[in-house]
Image (cartoon, rainbow, N blue to C red):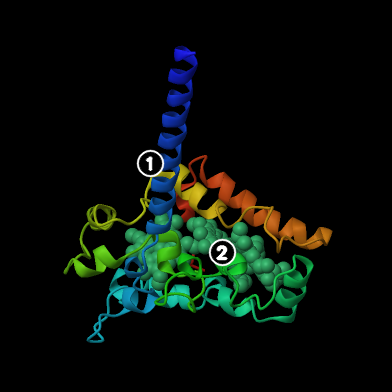
Amino acid sequence: MITLNVMRRREFICAGAAFLALATLMTMNSMSAPEAGYVGANKCGYTSEGMKCHAEDAIGNQFKIWQSSPHAGAVKTLQSLKAENIAQNVSVTNPSENKKCLKCHTTGGGNSENTKNEGVGCEACHGPGAGYYEASNHIDYIDRKKGYGKAVKNGMYPVLGIENLKKREKMCLRCHDDKRPCMPAETMEIQKQKQTIQSIDKLEKGDINFRHPLRK
Ligand code: HEC
Ligand code: HEC
Ligand code: HEC
């Protein structure tokens, strides 16, 4: 009888601990994308005084390249008739407001006021940039690896360089997976989208000529 009681108590404590761990995990999860964490693509391009940062040609003007890329239009895509039809098939109403779609069609899954209308922005791939943005003079014009080291130190994802190919692949495939609600049913379209997924997959094998994925 006593042993049984002890066991029950243990089970109770274990369940309690598991519950606590789960609760902590859940809070951590909802905290991993804090609203203040994302600054939005405009701030990556320009300072609040209008000075050029990543919109500077001398360092590759990633902002301009991004602006004309499909990623920048990803949230607009959700307003299309095609999006409406896809949404209907999975019982989603108002796709351009729905987190089930915003999850991959914008930065921060629609949880941040700063980014919910910008499409797949810089920080969707590079991670929340608030810490990096606040650290003044963070761009290293001479040594890009050193500059990127600062970004990572300030909380951004390590996606630059051959040693991070695997992490980068995982980051892309988080959205470019073939189980998403908008994976097409038409064979031709499936093939086209699978090609994108496969080319991302190939990166892992060490294709360092990939450069910036938004460069045409
Ligand atoms: C947050 C989700 C997300 C991440 C992360 C992401 N993508 Fe995308 N990507 C999209 C969406 C959504 C579209 C469709 C944009 C549109 O046309 O509206 C897209 C479009 C593309 C296209 C154009 C496809 C075409 O046929 O027009 C390419 C290429 C691409 N992504 C490659 C990548 C690569 C490489 C990475 C990683 C470095 C990446 N993506 C990371 C969501 C994402
Ligand atoms: C898991 C991530 C993910 C989710 C969730 C998601 N999408 Fe997408 N969506 C993508 C990616 C990635 C692409 C670009 C694929 C490509 O072109 O290779 C895309 C492309 C599209 C396109 C363009 C497709 C085409 O064939 O031209 C539409 C429209 C679309 N999504 C609508 C939606 C709608 C509506 C929802 C919500 C019901 C949704 N998506 C949810 C990742 C996602
Ligand atoms: C679809 C994902 C994605 C988006 C969106 C994106 N990037 Fe990148 N970016 C990458 C990846 C992956 C690399 C690493 C490329 C490599 O290793 O060659 C990279 C590289 C960079 C670099 C280093 C380039 C170099 O040549 O040294 C900078 C700076 C950069 N991105 C800034 C930005 C800015 C600013 C934006 C938005 C205006 C942006 N990126 C949008 C994925 C993305």
The circle drawn on residue 104 is 2
Q: Is residue 88 left or right of residue 211?
A: right
In the image, is the residue at mark 2 within 8 Å of ligand 2 by its beta carbon?
Answer: yes
Question: Farthest right residue?
Answer: 186
Residue 12 in the image: state x and y as whole percent.
Answer: 46, 30
Instruction: Tell me which residue sits at (52%, 39%) in the image.
Output: 205
Q: Is residue 211 visible?
A: no
Q: Is residue 31 left or right of residue 190?
A: left
Q: Mark 2 is on which residue type?
A: Cys
Residue 74 in the image: state x and y as whole percent.
Answer: 57, 73
Residue nearest the observer in this picture, 32 or 74 = 32
Question: Which residue in the protein does label 1 denote?
Answer: 163
Q: Is residue 59 left or right of residue 103?
A: left
For ligand 2, the image quadrant comes to: bottom right
Question: In the figure, 174 relative to 97: above or below?
Answer: above
Q: Mark 1 is on which residue type?
A: Glu
Instruction: Tell me which residue sits at (33%, 65%) in the image.
Output: 37
Question: Farthest left residue?
Answer: 136
Question: Farthest bottom residue?
Answer: 50
Dot 2 or dot 1: first in sequence order is: 2
Residue 164 in the image: state x and y as whole percent.
Answer: 40, 44
Question: Farthest front residue?
Answer: 1
Question: In the figure, 162 relative to 196: above or below?
Answer: above
Residue nearest the observer in this picture, 93 or 190 = 93
Which label lies toward us, 2 or 1? 2
Tell me the distance, in whole angstroms, between the alpha carbons under discs 2 and 1: 25 Å
Instruction: Tell me which residue sits at (22%, 86%) in the image.
Output: 49
Q: Is residue 102 left or right of residue 215?
A: right
Q: Secondary structure at mark 1?
A: helix
The circle drawn on residue 190 is none
Residue 185 in the image: state x and y as whole percent.
Answer: 81, 60
